[in-house]
């Protein structure tokens, strides 16, 4: 049985005062929930997460990581640096990194490998744009993104990660893939991984990300291949985020 996981991605939001109130509430009410909980915050706030969440039921991580372990890469942050602030997880390949900052499938795969080798658990994000969906290319795009990682690290390494399917057309738009649409892609992802390893595919947790709210989370999480959510806007509101976590139980 795959344990449900709910991850909040703050993106480029937050300040110290707001963060403290949000984190304290999540920390106090997360105890006893059956799902795993992660918060992904901007780099400057990782010390605050470490201070408030240490010893709690909530894990934390960064929103990206350099594919380089060290060196003359001004502005980059290495996996070893993230570990010093207690990170267990890191997002790799988020659609905003791919589409706004031009990260290629190969760069995402390199980040995945470096993060995992350092001891972090990568959360690999995959998904199609609206144009790609309208062309009927969803399965092809998602398979290509996963294949880049499989070709670099193999299926067993993928089994030590988490996947997140995030249709780009549903992120921050208020439009959500229907539970049936999301389930169809999640099943296709599991089938793609099973071509390399049936056991890895069976145990792999695949999250859905794309305008998940308390109002739609229960039906999404009820789908057989949806193992939780990667939450954007609702992760900035403690009551909404906690409501989604409770629905994942």
Image: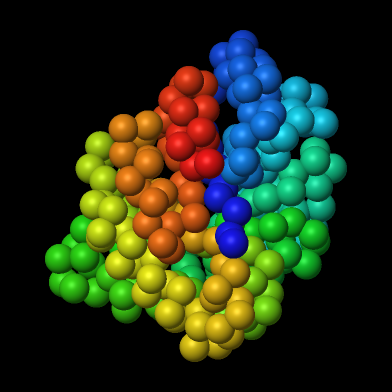
Residue 61 vertical placement versus 45 (above, below):
below
In this image, 23 relative to 242: left or right? Answer: right
How is the structure coloured here? rainbow
Name the image quarter holding residue 120. Answer: bottom right
Whether residue 13 is visible: no
In this image, 116 relative to 152: left or right? Answer: right
Outermost residue toward the bottom?
Answer: 195
User: How many callouts does the rendering have?
Assistant: 0
Task: From the top left corner, tell me how far across and down residue 29 is, in percent.
Answer: 63, 22
Task: From the top left corner, tell me how far across and down residue 145 is, in percent.
Answer: 45, 72
Front-most of 33 and 120? Answer: 33
In this image, 88 relative to 243: left or right? Answer: right
Task: From the top left corner, tell me how far across and down residue 165 is, in percent.
Answer: 41, 59
* Residue beneath the point at 26% across and 39% down: 173
Quadrant where the N terminus is found in the figure? bottom right
Front-most of 211 and 85? Answer: 211
* Residue beneath the point at 51% across and 33% down: 246
Name the image quarter holding residue 99. Answer: bottom left
In this image, 15 relative to 214: left or right? Answer: right
Residue 134 vertical placement versus 89 (above, below):
below
* Residue beneath the point at 42% across and 30% down: 234
Whether residue 159 is visible: yes
Task: From the top left corner, tell me how far across and down residue 220 is, in percent.
Answer: 35, 49
* Residue beneath the point at 37% across and 40% down: 217
């Amino acid at each position: 049985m795959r344990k449900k996981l709910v991850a909040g991605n703050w993106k480029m939001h937050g300040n110290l005062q707001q963060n403290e109130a949000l984190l304290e509430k999540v920390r106090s009410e997360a105890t006893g929930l059956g799902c795993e909980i992660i918060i992904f915050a901007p780099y400057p706030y990782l010390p605050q997460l470490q201070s408030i969440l240490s010893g709690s039921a909530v894990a934390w991580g960064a929103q990206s990581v350099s594919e380089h372990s060290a060196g003359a890469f001004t502005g980059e942050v290495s996996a070893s640096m993230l570990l010093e602030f207690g990170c267990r997880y890191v997002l790799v390949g988020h659609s905003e990194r791919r589409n706004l900052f031009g990260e290629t499938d190969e760069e995402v795969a390199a980040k995945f490998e470096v993060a995992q080798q350092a001891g972090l658990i990568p959360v690999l994000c995959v998904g199609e744009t609206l144009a790609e969906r309208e062309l009927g290319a969803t399965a092809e795009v998602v398979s290509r993104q996963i294949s880049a990682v499989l070709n670099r690290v193999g299926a067993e390494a993928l089994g030590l990660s988490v996947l997140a399917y995030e249709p780009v057309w549903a992120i921050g738009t208020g439009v959500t893939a229907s539970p049936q649409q999301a389930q169809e892609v999640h099943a296709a992802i599991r089938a793609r991984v099973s071509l390399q390893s049936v056991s890895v595919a069976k145990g792999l947790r695949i999250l859905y990300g794309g305008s998940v709210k308390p109002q739609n989370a229960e039906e999404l999480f009820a789908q057989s291949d949806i193992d939780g959510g990667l939450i954007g806007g609702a992760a900035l509101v403690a009551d909404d985020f906690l409501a989604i976590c409770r629905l994942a139980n």
